[in-house]
């Protein structure tokens, strides 16, 4: 049993805005320290950003408009706490405490991911999907049932009828859809709106990818300041995650679908 949402779901809009701001920070510094929370809906986008780089309304507003549409911006930018910043001085160390779990994807999870991607290519607006054994539930906004029925004749489609979706209907928040992003690899920390020094980003990517390669569950933990995880220098895990993010096209692209 698994749930997947598409990149136009309000929570993913929030994740994508956060990811795009992280991408922007990486154009200003090689290794910025940044953590972002986004709450977007009903005409306004609230953003709180702890950042080592200077960000202004002028920097962020084009991102909000491009991804979220006609939203007013409420932006708060503060510097990272000095004590936390000191943790990273001199070498790359874990940016926080955390537990992490990588789990090989099941056939069902891969199947639903493909269904979600396929539907979104034809209908690029807010959507949410569930697969529970043979039971497929499709909730797709701005789409008539008969359009989806051709490809998914046995699915439950828009059970309460036609709907419009988006941030005018619902509010989106960062890292509220980590089940959709990580399947059974969900742990305490979300993936989005953070730089690569954050264990929630780099170790989650590393653990998930290791589980897919080995076919085994991977369980890891770290304390803030650790310089080794899974017997490897933490800097190596950060570089592994950097290559992963670069390969898929950046943090905003990462936020669209998560890890699968």
Image: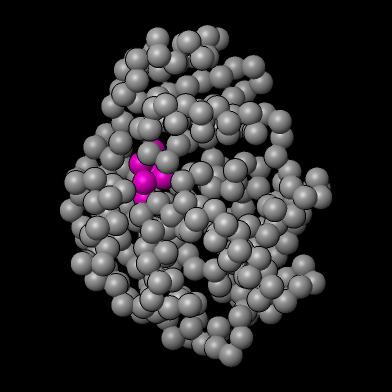
Q: Is residue 10 magenta?
A: yes
Residue 254 lies, in percent from the top left, at 50, 52
Residue 159 lies, in percent from the top left, at 41, 15
The answer to whether residue 167 of the structure is visible from this angle is yes
Q: Is residue 151 left or right of residue 184?
A: left
Magenta stretch, main secondary structure class = helix
Residue nearest the observer in this picture, 51 or 248: 248
Look at 47% across and 58% down and name the residue there.
251
Query: On screen, 195 above or below 186?
Result: below
Where on the picture, by quarter, is residue 141? top left
Look at 71% across and 30% down and name the residue there.
107
Residue 248 lies, in percent from the top left, at 54, 53
Dividing the image into 4 quarters, which one contains the C terminus? top right
Residue range corresponding to the magenta coloring: 9-14
The answer to whether residue 99 of the structure is visible from this angle is no
Q: Which residue lies most toward the bottom here?
A: 90
Q: Is residue 27 magenta?
A: no
Q: Is residue 65 left or right of residue 226?
A: left
Look at 54% across and 61% down and name the residue there.
246
Residue 3 lies, in percent from the top left, at 55, 33
Look at 38% across and 39% down and name the residue there.
8
């Amino acid at each position: 049993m698994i749930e997947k949402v598409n990149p136009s779901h309000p929570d993913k809009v929030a994740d994508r805005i956060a990811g795009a701001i992280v991408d922007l920070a990486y154009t200003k510094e090689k290794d910025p320290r940044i953590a972002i929370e986004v709450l977007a809906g009903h005409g306004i986008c609230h953003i709180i950003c702890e950042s080592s780089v200077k960000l202004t309304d002028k920097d962020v507003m084009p991102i909000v408009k491009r991804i979220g549409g006609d939203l007013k911006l409420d932006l708060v930018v503060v510097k990272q706490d000095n004590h936390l910043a000191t943790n990273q001085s001199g070498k790359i160390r874990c940016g926080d405490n955390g537990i992490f779990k990588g789990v090989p994807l099941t056939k069902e999870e891969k199947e639903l991911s493909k269904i979600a991607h396929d539907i979104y290519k034809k209908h690029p607006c807010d959507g949410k999907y569930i697969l529970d054994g043979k039971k497929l539930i499709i909730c797709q906004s701005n789409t008539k049932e008969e359009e989806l029925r051709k490809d998914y004749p046995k699915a439950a489609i828009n059970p309460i009828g036609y709907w419009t979706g988006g941030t005018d209907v619902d509010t989106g928040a960062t890292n509220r859809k980590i089940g959709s992003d990580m399947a059974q690899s969900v742990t305490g920390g979300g993936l989005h709106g953070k730089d690569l020094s954050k264990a929630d980003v780099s170790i989650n990517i590393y653990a998930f990818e290791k589980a897919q390669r080995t076919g085994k569950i991977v369980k890891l933990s770290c304390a803030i300041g650790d310089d080794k995880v899974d017997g490897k220098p933490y800097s190596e895990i950060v570089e592994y995650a950097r290559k992963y993010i670069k390969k898929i096209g950046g943090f905003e692209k990462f936020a669209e679908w998560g890890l699968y």
